[in-house]
Image: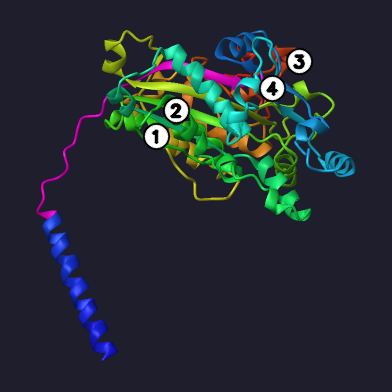
Amino acid sequence: MARRCWHKLKTTCRFQLSRHLSSSTSLPPPPLSSPRRVVVTGLGLVTPLGCGVGTTWKHLIEGKCGIRAVTTEDLKMNAFDKETLTLTFDQLTSKVAAIVPCGTAPGEFNEDLWFNAKDHRSIARFISYALCAADEALKDAKWAPADQEQKERTGVSIGGGTGSISDILDAAQMICEKRIRRLSPFFIPRILINMASGHVSMKYGFQGPNHAAVTACATGAHSIGDAMRMVQFGDADVMVAGGTESSIDALSIAGFCKARALTTKYNSSPSEASRPFDCGRDGFVIGEGSGVLILEELEHAKSRGAKIYAEVRGYGMSGDAYHITQPHTDGRGAILAMARALKQAGLHPSQVDYVNAHATSTPLGDAIEANAIKAMFTDHATSGSLAFSSTKRGLKCNGDKNNRKTSKGIKLCPRYSILGDYC
């Protein structure tokens, strides 16, 4: 009896499915709109060089360094005893980090305003950085929609890599001390990466797409690229897009140390630690901050007289399907991403005059990426017409910049020495 019922159920389900599929294929295709052009109309930054685009840019071109030595206070271990804190600090092999300067002076991140207020109990540090950067970007774009339709046509796409690991560490300590009943009801909202986008949308009433990419080092690029496509295909007219991170804590640093990803040679000279493409590189410098752009449909921006910084023409993604941390030795992942972005943009490689590299100062990754750029741009890469840099490198060059060389023997271009570029 049961077998007959099951057979009858399968037959009925199969019939209904086939009927549904046949009716679906008889429908006309969904309406397609031609992709719309997307421009950048606002910028916002919270970086180790300072809070705000103006401050960051001023310090960058002055050759100032956002990297300093890590202290025990930076580990965010307030719930632990002093002995545990000291032992943890002593066991960290990397003791440099790019930390956002906090304070009330101009150009510093004001924690009382963005982080420590009583009504901010559900806001972790990475969320507060996003709120600050988004606020600057929206003001720069002069976009403050008041009517309902404008709010419905404005979305947010802000991603993050790890969320708030320090909150997880504090919660684990509560379990060890048998105090779990004292866990904050805001614990989950504080660690969810999508809450950066969520809080920005709630603050301004934006009811368009609300999106959060979580793709490690590619998070910011994915968030901006995804937002671009949302504007292109009509899901929104304006998108607040970018990335945010706050990973300067004991557990995050220890984890990357165990993965042998962080620099360890420059603990006594932090300003020399981040050196993409340089022959003395030995790992990346962990950092924090947020960067947010306002992406807008071109005609929408022109109709309101918005300042236009640039057009976002192409976006390429790829995966090399090779290893959890190491790129494929032939750089195929990077090559595919660049090729796809150029194809979508309708550009030839020779039309590109600047490449912003991922290069994090790791021995293997930087070399593979440099070769991928050479493979993609061929003779144009070494012609002197193509500049490229990694923005991790906001440092002043030490020594004779004309004689600094990469492991491949390519000189760093003196014109871009502050950024650590080479041609």
State yes or no: residue 31 in magenta: yes
Q: Is residue 260 left or right of residue 123?
A: right
Please indicate whether residue 325 sits to the left or right of residue 228 in the image: right
Q: Which mark is residue 241?
A: 2
N-terminal label among 4 and 2: 2
| Of callouts 1 and 4, the N-terminal one | 1
Residue drawn at point x = 65 percent, y = 21 percent: 112
Magenta range is: 25-48
Q: Determine crowd level at label 4: few under 14, some 14-19, many 20+ residues with C-alpha closer than 10 A.
A: some
Q: Are marks 2 and 1 in contact (CB under 8 Å)?
A: yes
Q: How far apart are marks 1 and 4 (CA)?
A: 37 Å
The residue wearing badge 1 is 226
Total number of numbered discs in the rendering: 4
Quadrant hosting residue 367: top right
Q: In this view, does 153 lie to the left or right of 338?
A: left
For label 3, the SS is loop
Q: Could you tell me the amino acid type at mark 3? A: Asn
Q: Calculate the distance from the C-alpha at mark 3 to the C-alpha at mark 4.
A: 12 Å
Residue 347 appears anywhere in the view:
yes
Q: Position of residue 210 (x, y in %)?
A: 40, 36
Marks 2, 1: nearer the viewer: 2
